[in-house]
Amino acid sequence: MEAKLGMSPIAWWNDDLPQLSDDVSLEECLRQSRSAGFVGMELGQRFPSDPSEMLPILRAADVTLCGGWFHGSLSTESLEANKDRIQPMIELFKAVDAPCIVYGEGGRSIQGEQGTPLAKKPVLSDDEMAAYARKVTAFGEWAAEQGMPLAYHHHMGAVVQFEHEIDAFAAHSGEGIPLLFDAGHLAFAGGDPLRMIDNHHARISHVHTKDIRQPVVNALDFERDSFLDAVIKGAFTVPGDGSLDFDAIVARLGSYGYEGWFVIEAEQDPKTAPPLEMAHTGYAALMKALNAAGYEVVQ
């Protein structure tokens, strides 16, 4: 089995919380992550949108684009509106040979609203979830026909957050919309990462290896604290610095033959959690887990 290791630039620059951002260039971000051993980087706010500009930067850093977030709105807007917005991203990702676009549901989501507590997350009725899942499937099938597959990201504060919501979404959606597995978001929501892998391994096409600090999560007041408050308080971190057992998580993915990207996405304060130091910590933890599970890691 083959694995590739990537990072998200959110460790360096946080789009939702500018105060949690290092004043570093794209080139320096890529240099640091590559020096720690990572061969991929997901899209971030300081990337150029023209492939003729992006490719030389990626090649100079010896990394590839390994994904990126699309802020979808299928829970509130039409397929056509979302197709129009994602089309330039599809063309960019195809031009730089990225593996997928990460679909994150922004419609009705509270993930970017610091004044809205976690308890106020949107909830879909059974009928709404079924209709939404079918709509996202149609969008995923269309994107794949354009040459760029999507991976659906369950996320704190969004319409698909809890494990039972992931199960319902998976039950009503089709293979045309693969799943992104994010251990940290699932554990934050009280779910069982190993059980999700058991239940949905056939649909998992992309993996975010976000860790959590369980004592921080346990201390949150869901009636008062927002998702962004949780980030500021340090709920998330890299594998090897948190509470999740990534040896077991990686071994379970390997037992089902998962191959592809393992991407560290860990938003926290770069002043208290220096990104390069965190990159080394996460890389060491993932390499240990991947080697034990029998993966060949692309260097």
Image (cartoon, helix red, strand yellow):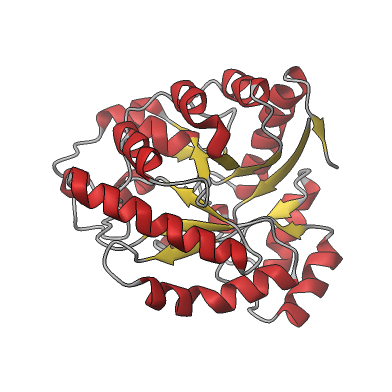
Q: Is residue 221 left or right of residue 23?
A: left
| Residue 49 rendering spot, x and y as whole percentages | 63, 79
Residue sticking out furthest to the left? 223
| Residue 153 rendering spot, x and y as whole percentages | 45, 49
Residue drawn where x is 56% and y is 52% of the image: 11
Res. 16 image quadrant:
bottom left
Name the foreground residue: 129 vs 71.
129
Res. 89 image quadrant:
bottom right
Residue drawn where x is 80% and y is 49% of the image: 35
Placement of 80 over or under 227, stated as above or below:
below
Residue 15: tell me if it is visible: no
Residue drawn where x is 50% and y is 59% of the image: 140
Q: How many marks?
A: 0
| Residue 24 rendering spot, x and y as whole percentages | 63, 66
Q: Is residue 181 left or right of residue 99?
A: left
Q: Quadrant of the N terminus?
A: top right
Placement of 10 over or under 185, stated as above or below:
below
Residue 164: tell me if it is visible: yes
Q: Quadrant of the C terminus?
A: top right
| Residue 142 rendering spot, x and y as whole percentages | 52, 65
Name the foreground residue: 5 vs 22.
5
Q: Is residue 139 left or right of residue 37?
A: left
Name the foreground residue: 147 vs 269.
147
Name the foreground residue: 276 vs 256.
256
